[in-house]
Image: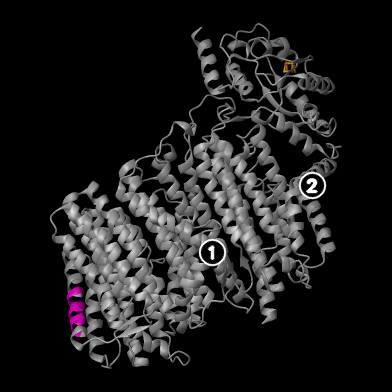
Amino acid sequence: MEKVVWALILIPWALALAVFISPWHRLRQAITFLSLPVLVYLTYLLSDGSLPLLIHTPHWVSQLITLYDFLLLFYFLYQGLKFRSFLVSVLSLFQIFLLVWVLLILPHREGAELLVDRLTLFMYWIVATVGTLISIYATKYMEQENLERENRFVSVLLWFLGVMNFAVSVNNLEWFFALFETTTLASYVLIRFRWDEISIKNALRALWMNQVGGIAILLAILFAVKYYGVYRFTEILAIKGHLISMVPLGFLAISALVKGAQMPFHRWLLGAMVAPTPVSAILHSATMVKIAPYLILRLSPVIKGTLLAKLLIITTGFVFVSAGLLALTQDNFKKILAYSTISLLGLMMLTGAMGSSTAVLASLLLILFHAVVKALLFMEAGVMEKLFKAKYLEDIRRLVERAPVTVFFVSIGFMSMTIVPYGIFVAKWLTLEEASNFLSHGAYVGSIIFVATGGVILTLLYFKIIGVMTRKREEFFRFRLEKLPFVYLFSTVPLVVFTIVGSIFIALLSTKLINPVVSQVVGSPAPIKALGLTLQTGVSELYGWQIVGAFTLLLIVPVCAYFIHFSGTDRVFTYTCGERVELNLGTYDFLCISQVEPLVETVSVALFVLTLVLGGGLV
Amino acid sequence: MSLALLITLLSPVIGGFVYGVERILRARMQGRVGPPLLQPFYDFFKLLEKRSMVIHSFHAFMGLMYLLGTWFSLYVLLSGGDILIAIFFHLLSLAFLVVGGFSVRSSYSILGSMRELLHMVAYEPVFVLAAAGLYLITGTFQISQILHSDKLPLLYLPLVFIALLLTLPSVLKKSPFDVAEAHQEIIGGPEIEYSGKFYEAIYTAKWIEYVYAFFFVFLFAGGSWWLGALLVLLSFFLVNLIDNATARVNFRQMVAFHWCVLIPLVVINLMLLALWRS
Amino acid sequence: MDFKKFRKKSPWLLHYNTGSCNGCDIEILACLAPKYDLERFGILNRGNPKQSDVLIVTGPVTKRARERLIRLYFEMPEPKVVVAVGACACTGGVFRHMYNVLNGVDKVIPVDVYVPGCAARPEAIIDGVAKALEILEKKKKDFVPPKVCKNVEVKEPINRKFLLEKCLGVKNEG
Ligand code: SF4
């Protein structure tokens, strides 16, 4: 088993190297294609084993990692000096200082350095499927963009998968710091990939913001060692019940919030859109930002019910609503997607912080479906950009006339984030019920308000975009389905299929596959049952016929739209009060919301500080 | 279950009668005589016979889907399942109307669809929070159990009930919250481009929405169905009174009213209740 | 069931002003107000050609209004009737033979009922609409092209967009 874990961590590195040195495009593509079955098979091997798995490592690995830490930080410092970025250099220096301090006081105790439990495995699954599909997609994307630098790009993506696998399986907080900073490095390299001015600027911004998270982790280690004398996840989780101080947990939560691009640290994720689109896809779906909910879920047994959890709920809930609101004012497709990621990450962490088994189930469902759907949407954004030259809402208007298949996929992606039978909806529904449950104990009133209002705002956002895309001038019968390159179809269709099939069998999925994860995170499984397609929770049911009915309603639409033309009926113009005008309509831009943006940011800063100071118990 | 099916199948008829009564009531409130009771059905049959015209087939088809979706969501509500699911199914049916409205290049239609979404933004949180309130009282989200609970939710949730009553105009597109339809301004919004049989689908779906919306009022009486019927009658009267007595607000005022007045109202009620309990 | 009789019971109005002095329009609105209460007959003022049965036109049809009137007429689904309300709409009235008017609605689209008067009294309008309803009940669901398009061939099913473009185009050439 241990070998499999190491293989999962190291094989992406090897593949990345192979891609990097291989001279032909076809070979690189083949290697990338290979990563999918290999990683899936390895993850599958692990699924059978007995988990959790604690892996001890020889001492030299630790020393190697420490050395690597210093190299990394000096590299950051070098980058800061090279690009004259004050923040980056100062933060790197501060990190080096803190790291030295940590190493000085770190007690040496025997213990497992790697921890592979079902939560880790869950993340492995996402990386092995969604992550590799994005890499495959990237090979074609880069072929259309810049074949010369394709090898670098794809190899960084593959390497990123390995890093991610490593990051979610470490137990030692110091190692976690190293991996955390490595993901920062990976994102930095990817964002500045195009080497123009704005890319470098945004990459540096991503770098310093994530370094703040790194500092938070180092401080967390310092305080954990000071108060408890421990520095491993398992040990921190073991001391639950008699916590002396919340400070380390507060700092860890802050690092999660930063990594999860929660306001006010959301700008680095928005900046990531200047890079080639697969970068956004991989940052938003399988890797990087998913560390944030992962970390909260790891800690959720200890922070559950504390003031920290409550403040986290308010902070992330606020982000859930306000990021959705700000997304309404945007007109760049990728930016809208980025805002909606920030918003949904807020929801994931909110449910994670609630910490009850049903909430954690909802959080895991959200992570899973969000990864799939966001990967799909960003890939489609790339397709739209490359094949149809559509980047802004202006350009995607009447896209359905040119690219019905793409529009269909994007619509499925959007609808699956709000509308009734899809996975993310089920997660929201579970959250609402759990929030009402909490409410009956006289607490957490914030959570239900945020979930109820944030959901509708996202619905408004997505339907606004679907509305722009589906606008047409003429009848459908003159249109043809567009031809997409095979690689694009290969990487997107499985995601679409999973979104639909996974949502139909949501009951089985959540009881059989997700609930074991929940029981390992929380300690007890969520009280849900599957009866055929019907999902039963303690207080209510989502019937199978409802799911199937909703899907029939939804899937009738594209099918019939293609076949039914009412060819016997008259065609008329749209009503224009009798005027002969060429109409060119946009959509609402919600300028009134962008006026309150400074206010929103101020509040989010305040909440951030509150979380740290009150939740972490710094006072 | 069979009762639910029966009501669902008959809901266009019931909704039609409700609409007929409403037209008479409204006329009487204005000192007019008003149309005959069966007027909505006359309209229905007339529309059936008109020659239909379409902008393009997708648009017309979405009108039919709206009817189907509304009908299905009503069945989800009446069949006694989860109340939240029923609320979100309504959203699904609304989605058809909205996408249909967006799919034509008519300014009225697009404006109307956008406003339809804003309606949804306004009233849906209130509905969700009201469902949470019902859960606090009855301990279940299943409508069938709420309808048989021996508690009277109205007693515990007076503010929630008031908030729900005040959202009804927005659900049913009545003045002052009829920005999506706004007959004098955008001539029906998303429904403007439908005609003949396709308009008929929209027209009928609106009747079904009457049944859908007033059923929520009915739920507030819990197990005592007579009280529920009384509540429905009262709220029906009240909604029409408000409709006749007020002028249209703009969409910002509408959303602001729902978010800044009604949601706090609901939350205060829920918080007091939860505090009282704990 | 014979649906034809329901036409009479639920006529929906579209009211269009082709350059009248607003006198007749005020009277039409008076019909809908409580005193005369046209809704007794199930009449609704829809303001939307696609859902209306009765087109009530006032005014002498200025040259600018001509195209709009034709478009609105095209957009109404059959069966439909046209009621010309006021002396202007019937013959041009006080505006007759002015340089900018076409002297009456029937120069452009087929008119079924003429309601005279300057301004037409509400009673007369109600009477006219009632007459129109009788005609409406007898009407077939055929498409009668407006006067200006008589020379354009009409085929079933009608693509009105095409037809409209063509017939206005023909006129413009001539
Ligand atoms: S008929 Fe007389 S009142 Fe009527 S529009 Fe003409 S001028 Fe005015």
Local secondary structure at mark 1: helix
The quadrant of the rendering that contains the N terminus of chain A is bottom left
- The image's mark for residue B18 is 2
Count neighbours of disc 1 (C-alpha within 10 A) and say few if under 14, some if 14 to 19, many if 20 or more.
many
Asked whether mark 2 lies closer than 8 Å to ligand 1, one says no
Residue sitting at x 75%, y 21%? C24
Q: From what the image shows, is residue B176 above or below residue B58? A: below
What is the spatial separation of the Cα atoms under label 1 and label 2, in whole angstroms?
34 Å
Local secondary structure at mark 2: helix
Residue sitting at x 66%, y 46%? B178
Residue sitting at x 54%, y 66%? A450
Q: Which residues are magenta?
A: A63-72
Q: Nearer the viewer, residue A41 or A86?
A: A41
Residue identified by numbered label 1? A426
Left or right: where does residue A316 sit relative to residue A199? right
Left or right: where does residue A376 sit relative to residue B32? left
Tell us which disc is closer to us: 1 or 2: 1
Question: In the rendered structure, does residue C54 fall within the stretch colored magenta?
Answer: no
Q: Are marks 1 and 2 on the same chain?
A: no
Q: Tell me residue B266's x, y (percent).
A: 67, 66
Magenta segment, prevailing SS (helix, strand or loop): helix
Q: Tell me residue A157's x, y (percent).
A: 25, 62
Q: From what the image shows, is residue C128 above or below residue B110? A: above
Q: Nearer the viewer, residue A111 or B187?
A: A111
The kind of residue tagged 2 is Val
Question: Quarter-wise, where is residue B123 in the image?
Answer: bottom right
Left or right: where does residue A346 sit relative to residue A25? right
Q: Is residue B252 visible?
A: no
The quadrant of the rendering that contains the C terminus of chain A is bottom left
How many numbered markers are drawn? 2
The kind of residue tagged 1 is Val
